[in-house]
Amino acid sequence: MGRIIAIDYGRKRCGIAVTDPLKIIANGLETVPTHQLMEFLKNYMRREQVELIIIGQPTQLNGEPSESMRYITPFINRLKKEMPDTPVEMVDERFTSTIAHQAMIDGGMKKSDRRDKARVDTIAASIILNDYLQSKQFKGL
């Protein structure tokens, strides 16, 4: 069984989360600079079987794609070209950064640690992946 990997794509850095092989639990993996993301994914997928890549889709409150899609779409096209055997899906990522900050507060994280944007990105990727897993659970995966 393969894992599912989720990406919270950003212009400077990307948060990455991954499931266990049974696709039950999503865990934050790490944050990588955006210009190193493709190489990171290739290296990771040499070591681990990945059956699906989820990418957060930034959407405005009215449901329209956000400005960030102009950076994400070329990456998705390149990803599909370089890894044609791995499906790629997009998942609405509205409010994931806000939810990540709240989770950090609820978890008792110090204010100085909550300013670590890389940590927020990894938690946001975990939230995106958890949302995806929960949506599939209710649909019968």
Image (spheres, rainbow, N blue to C red):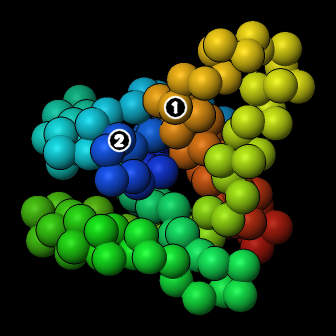
Vertical comparison of 114 with 62: above or below: above
- Quarter of image, res 91: bottom right
Q: Local crowd at mark 1 within 10 Å, few (<14), some, or many (≥20)?
A: some
Q: Local crowd at mark 2 within 10 Å, few (<14), some, or many (≥20)?
A: some
Asked if residue 29 lies left or right of residue 22, the reply is: left
Which kind of residue does numbered mark 2 sit on?
Answer: Arg
Whether the residues at callouts 2 and 1 have beta carbons within 8 Å, the answer is yes
Tell which circle, 2 or 1, labels the residue nearer the N-terminal end.
Answer: 2
Q: Who is closer to the viewer here, 88 or 33?
A: 33
The N terminus sits in image quarter = top left
Horizontal and vertical percent for residue 112? 65, 13
Vertical comparison of 99 with 71: above or below: above
The C terminus sits in image quarter = bottom right
Residue displayed at 38% across by 43% down:
14
Residue 13's label in the rendered image is 2
- Quarter of image, res 84: bottom left
* Residue 140 shows up from this direction: yes
* Residue 21 shows up from this direction: no
Residue matched to label 1: 117
Which kind of residue does numbered mark 1 sit on?
Answer: Lys
SS at circle 2: strand
Residue displayed at 15% across by 68% down:
78
Alpha carbons under labels 2 and 1: distance apart: 9 Å
Vertical comparison of 139 with 47: above or below: below
Residue displayed at 18% across by 39% down:
36
Horizontal and vertical percent for residue 17? 50, 39
